[in-house]
Image: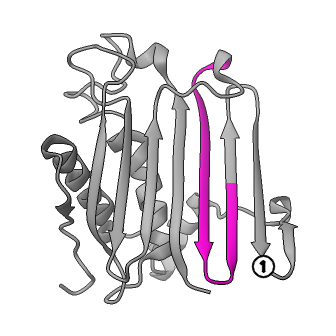
Amino acid sequence: GRVFMAHTAYLGYEVKRISDPADWKSDMDKAGGGALIDAGYHAIDLINYWLTQDGYVWPKYVQALGGRLVTHIPHKGEDNIALLLEYTDGTIINIQVSFTVCNAGCHRQPTIVFEHNFYGTQGSLYYGFDWDTARGRSHFELVRPEEGRENIDLTQDSDIDAREHFLDCLTNKTRPLVTSLDARNALAVVEAAYDSMRTGRKVEINWRSPGS
């Protein structure tokens, strides 16, 4: 089916580092920004990879709201931010990024909870991953109107070895799974979101399609 809406959340607990004036984490000069350009960039890149169709579907507008909601170090960036992405086909994506959400393992900071929920015309997909310094775990569930819930065993799938893929691209001229244009476009969404957070307005994304 067709995805018409999705929600992604990158909920980390980095209070110790972002509260340290000497730490690079969220330092505007050293890191370039806060939670969005650090952690949120990865969420945006994944959403673009899954939903963008070159020449047909891409994120057109973004509206963002956030700031230093928990910590108050002047030269540090935002610790929380929420984005609303509007794609050219009308798909709506909500992205939440935080460095101050205490989750199950936040006493062992840093921690991460990474969630992706996709809502489509024929069902919904729910994927989640959480990690702390002691353990990591993930789950994947498919829900369909006539068939109910189905848990998908992710342990049977082998992860792509990034080093082998890189060597394959060099020796066999294989197209990289993530290109420099993909990275550029993810950053374009981040920059537009920062502009929206500053102005309070919906901002058009400076998207670039292959060959443009």
**Residue depicted at x 68% and y 51%:** 128
**Residue depicted at x 65% and y 28%:** 103
**Residue depicted at x 71% and y 27%:** 104
The N terminus: image quadrant: bottom right
**Quadrant in the picture for residue 11:** top right
Counting from the top left corner in percent of width and height, residue 208 is at 22, 75
Pick the front one: 170 or 107 = 107
- Image colouring: one colour
Report if residue 115 lies within the magenta region. Answer: yes
Pick the front one: 114 or 159 = 114
**Residue depicted at x 54% and y 28%:** 101
Counting from the top left corner in percent of width and height, residue 190 is at 28, 52
Residue designated by label 1: 145
Regarding mark 1 in the picture, which secondary structure is present there?
loop
Report if residue 55 lies within the magenta region. Answer: no
The C terminus: image quadrant: bottom left
Pick the front one: 20 or 101 = 101
- Crowdedness near tag 1: few (<14), some (14–19) or many (≥20) residues, C-alpha within 10 Å: few
Is the stretch drawn in magenta largely helix, strand or loop?
strand
**Quadrant in the picture for residue 123:** bottom right
Stretch of the chain drawn in magenta: 108-127
